[in-house]
Image: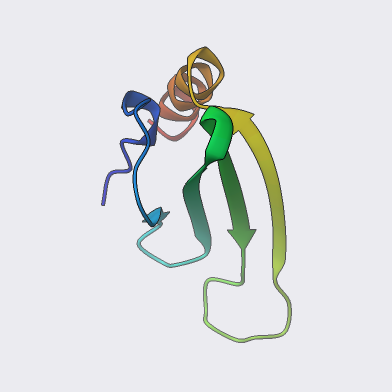
């Protein structure tokens, strides 16, 4: 599934989620007030055992900052 959060600056309702095929990487974007996007990135073992899970949440601006992050991620994940 492709996440197009970097191209939508008007905002949206609910969460936009991208998950790798093995479900070991999950990215979720939620539009918040004042033109900010709350992003949560999660890592988990790809074999499905629940031994560990790492997650970080941060907030960025929905304009150029979001577009720059989306471009960087496209380059990284190809």
Quarter holding the C terminus? top left
The picture quadrant where one finds residue 6 is: top left
In this figure, what is the number of numbered marks?
0
Q: Is 65 placed above or below 46 here?
A: above
Q: Residue at x 28, y 44 (%)?
A: 2
Q: Is 60 placed above or below 25 here?
A: above
**Which residue is nearer to you in this view: 11 or 53?**
11
**Which residue is nearer to you in this view: 65 or 42?**
65
Q: Is residue 30 left or right of residue 45?
A: left
Q: Is 24 placed above or below 77 here?
A: below
Q: Residue at x 32, y 29 (%)?
A: 8
Q: Is residue 55 left or right of residue 44?
A: right
**Which residue is nearer to you in this view: 29 or 77?**
29
The picture quadrant where one finds residue 50 is: bottom right
Residue located farthest toward the left when viewing the structure as drawn: 1
Residue located farthest toward the front when viewing the structure as drawn: 34
Across and down, in percent, residue 70 comes to 45, 26
Residue located farthest toward the top when viewing the structure as drawn: 64
Q: Residue at x 70, y 71 (%)?
A: 53
Q: Is residue 69 left or right of residue 6?
A: right
Across and down, in percent, residue 63 comes to 48, 18
Question: How has the structure been colored for display?
Answer: rainbow
Across and down, in percent, residue 75 comes to 44, 22
Q: Residue at x 56, y 18 (%)?
A: 65
């Amino acid at each position: 599934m492709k996440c197009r959060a970097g191209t939508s600056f008007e905002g949206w309702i609910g969460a936009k989620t991208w998950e790798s095929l093995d479900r070991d990487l999950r990215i979720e974007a939620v539009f918040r007030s004042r033109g900010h996007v709350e992003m949560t990135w999660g890592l988990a073992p790809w074999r499905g055992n629940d031994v560990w899970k790492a997650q970080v949440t941060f907030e960025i601006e929905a304009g150029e900052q979001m577009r720059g992050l989306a471009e960087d991620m496209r380059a990284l994940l190809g």
